[in-house]
Amino acid sequence: MHGADEADGRAASSLVTEIALLSERLKKVYGDQAYNGVFAQPLDKWNIRFEKASRPETARGFVPVAKR
């Protein structure tokens, strides 16, 4: 948990080591655009792939995004 004045990706990047040590079988983490940069880069060091969940380009209005 962090303050509203701190970016989500930067705040979550402090958890990368803990996430990586949860399981040696962890291969992929799903997230949205807020986690794509600062959070995704340290995951690469642990050979964990970051995949951005996004709605289809053809979708209009609210669409539940799979794998979120």
Image (spheres, rainbow, N blue to C red):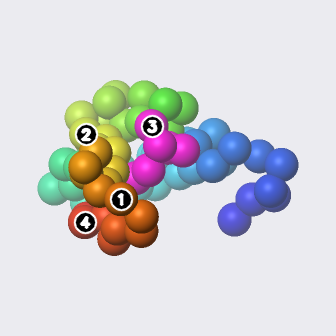
Distance, label 1 to label 3, CA atoms, is 23 Å
Alpha-carbon span between mark 3 and mark 4:
17 Å
Marks 1 and 2 in Cβ contact (< 8 Å): no
Crowd band around label 2 with a 10 angstrom C-alpha radius: few (<14), some (14–19), many (20+): some
Mark-to-mark CA distance, 2 and 3? 11 Å
- Please give the name of the residue rendered at 24% of the width and 34% of the height, measured from the top-left corner: 47
Membership of 32 in magenta stretch? yes
- Distance of label 1 from label 2 (alpha carbons): 28 Å
Mark 4 falls on what kind of element? loop
For label 1, count other residues whose C-alpha is less than 10 Å away and answer few (under 14), some (14-19) or many (20+).
Answer: few
Residues rendered magenta in the picture:
29-36
Quarter of image, res 4 = bottom right
Estimate the x, y position of residue 42 in percent, counting from the top left. 44, 32
Amino acid beneath label 1 = Arg
Which residue matches tag 3?
36
Amino acid found under the numbered disc labelled 4: Ala
Determine which residue is flagged by label 1: 60
First in sequence: mark 4 vs mark 1: 1
Q: Amino acid at mark 2?
A: Arg
Viewer-nearest of labels 3 and 4? 4
Which amino acid type is marked by label 3?
A: Asn
Residue 35: in magenta span: yes
Instruction: Kindly identify which numbered label has been placed on residue 66.
Output: 4
Query: Which type of secondary structure does the marked residue at label 2 adopt?
Result: strand
Cα separation, mark 4 vs mark 1, equals 15 Å
Q: N-terminal of the two: label 1 or label 3?
A: 3
